[in-house]
Image (cartoon, rainbow, N blue to C red):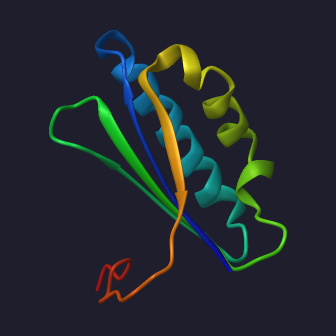
Amino acid sequence: MHQVIARYKVKLDRAEENLELVRAVYDELERTKPVGLHYATFLLDDGVSFVHVARADADPNPLPQVAAFQKFQREIADRCEEQPQVSDVEEVGAYRFFDRG
C-alpha cells in the first residue's frame, strides 16, 4: 500500500482550468473503476489551493495510467503559483473518511 498527500496553489487565472482537469480525472475514474485506488481532492477556502490524497492498494499504482490524470499533470508547473509538494504519509487513524453513508 502506498499513500501520498499532494498540496499546491494554482494561479488565480488558472483555478477554473485546474478544477476542470481534476473533474475530468474523476469522470474517467468513475468510468474505468481502477481496482485498489482510493483518491480524493479538496479545494481550500482560498479557491486556489488544492490537496490531493491518494492511496494505492494495487501494485503498480493505477493512477498514473489514467489518461485524464496524465493530462492533468502535463502542465501543472505552468498552472501553479506554488509547485506541488508531495509527501508519503502513514495513516495514524481514520473514521469513515471516505464513507458517504
Left or right, 73 with reference to 93: right
In the picture as drawn, the residue positioned furthest to the right comes out as: 60
The image shows residue 94, relative to residue 39, as above or below, that is below
Q: Position of residue 81 (x, y in %)?
A: 39, 19
Which quadrant of the figure has residue 11?
top left
Above or below for 64 versus 77: below
Q: Position of residue 100 (x, y in %)?
A: 31, 79
Placement of the C terminus among the 4 image quadrants: bottom left
Would residue 98 appear left or right of 54 to someone viewing this image? left
Q: Which residue is drawn at the image coordinates 36% and 41% (left, top)?
A: 50
Q: How many marks?
A: 0
Quadrant housing residue 43? top left
User: Camera-side residue: 58 or 5?
Assistant: 5
Residue 92: percent from left, percent from top: 39, 87
- Quadrant where the N terminus is found in the figure: bottom right
- Along the line of sight, which residue is nearer the eye, 3 or 32? 3
- Name, please, the residue furthest toward the left: 45
Q: Name, please, the residue furthest toward the top.
A: 13
| Residue 54 position (above or below residue 26) | below
Residue drawn at the location 34% of the way across and 86% of the way down: 94
Residue 35 location, quadrant:
bottom right
Residue at the location (54% across, 49% down)?
Answer: 86
Residue 36 image point, x, y percent: 69, 77
